[in-house]
Amino acid sequence: MQQREKLSSRLGFILLSAGCAIGLGNVYRFPIITGSYGGAIFVLIYIAFLVLLGLPIMIAELSVGRGSQRSIATSFEVLQKPKQKWGFMKYLGIAGNYLLMMFYCTISGWMIIYFFKYLNGSIMTKQGGAALGSVFGSMVSNTGLMIGVTLGVIVVCFLICSLGLQKGVEKITKVMMIALFALIFGLVIYCLTLDNAGEGLKFYLIPSVSNIKSAGIWTVITAAMGQAFFTLSIGIGSIAIFGSYIGKDRRLLGEATTIISLDTAIALMSGLIVFPACFTFNNGVTADAGTVGAGFLFTTLSSIFNAMPGGRIIGALFFLFMIFAAFSTVIAVFENIISFWIELAGVKRRTAALINIGIVSVLSLPCIFSLNIWGNITVLGMTFMDLEDFVVSNMLLPIGSLCYVIFCTTRYGWGWDNFFSEANCGDKGPKLPKWIRPYMKFVLPLIIIVVFAVSVVGKFI
């Protein structure tokens, strides 16, 4: 086993972990479901579920990573008691990481293409949803272009990881995350100066009882619960890997709170961009929470940018921000994959990176082909891209999170005493309270099971 690398600073750990959690869904999905499900009331429910659901699971995942000083490849086996059989988690976790990258790298490539479309101004002549929808359709139906840009994302991000933990992953992600926050602050300030920004903020931030009544209170609650759960990328070891790279001087409650706060801040600020722009240049029309997807980015928002004074610059900056959000997640997951290979196969970092450039490139092909030459092929009524997304988001994340919680809180795994000691190791930051034990042991697993059941059953009903 090679000597384990360490992050050079706490800031690196926070930005890397937050970068893994902050993804493309923060930018376009969160604002829309917030507006559709009651504005400020939805936000409050969402934050409540982040605290009740996301925070304890993240603490559990970070504790397993730091306690074992390993990736998900061997972390459970290092910590498990004699005769326990937690080795299956390596397969669940790595499957989740690969599946996520099978479609996420392709979507990341879309952001690059649209950044250049705005940078050179070629898209500015297109007006209206039909024309912009045709541009997007032509892009994804171009098989060669999709393979090329996806391969570009994979190569660049694996090469960053191959430079090393500190010189590559930490250094580059720090720059990207700082730039990401600078870009979103700038875009927020600009959008708040738009003519109908006040109406957009009213729609976004003032509670709407009528929206809740029309959607149904249970729908609103389950939507908030699902968004809180899936936004953090917990359950497949992509957060635990960074726990394994930090020291034991700080308690993990404070670290997890900081990571979740940054993730939530990006989501909330995205709404401060989307709704003022929609109400100024799109007559308040956004997208329905039940159908929001890539089309919102590439038709609705693009039509808004094209109607704005200076929209070419704003559009380019927005998609640059999206690239940073996407790449921060890809690099974090690739780091987990590389660490997995280093621990199990004993290969060097650069060798693992080169091997996985080939693996992830091949695994990405079904997603790419589902957008064009395999567009008519479906499994359970879903394209390969949708199926990959569904399996990761609706199955592997909740199942993995449930396993982390059971492993940390029961005698069938690492056990509460070991977990509690690791979470509270250090002399900085707030302590995880003792009274949380019955909640994490009995209530939290039940909530996860409900999320899993609702998300899976709801897909086919």
Image: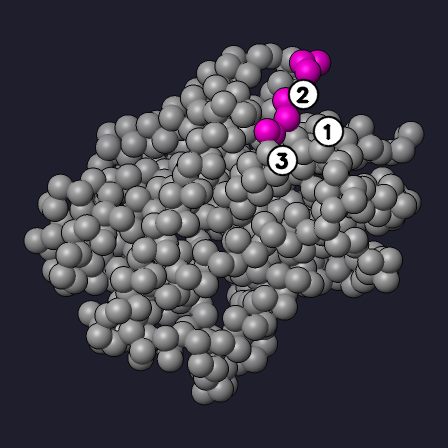
Q: Which residue is mark 1?
A: 69
Q: CA distance from mark 2 to mark 1?
A: 8 Å
Q: Residue at x 82, y 58 (%)?
A: 433
Q: Is residue 75 magenta?
A: no
The answer, for residue 457, to whether it is visible in the render is no
Report x, y in % for residue 144.
24, 30
Q: Residues within 10 Å of mark 1 (few under 14, many from 20)?
A: many
Residue placed furthest toward the left: 125
Task: Please give the range of residues in magenta.
Answer: 1-8
Q: Residues within 10 Å of mark 2 (few under 14, many from 20)?
A: few
Q: Taking 373 as reference, is 276 above or below it?
A: below
Residue 361 as seen in the image, left or right of residue 143: right
The prevailing secondary structure element of the residues shown in magenta is loop
Q: Which residue is mark 2?
A: 4
In front: 247, or 203? 247
Q: Amino acid at mark 2?
A: Arg
Q: Taking 324 as reference, is 429 above or below it?
A: below
* Mark carried by residue 31: none
Q: Residues within 10 Å of mark 3 (few under 14, many from 20)?
A: many
Q: Amino acid at mark 3?
A: Phe
Report x, y in % for residue 24.
41, 50
Label 2 close to label 1 by CB (< 8 Å): yes
Report x, y in % for residue 101.
47, 36
In front: 347, or 184? 184
Q: Which residue is mark 3?
A: 242
Label 3 close to label 2 by CB (< 8 Å): no
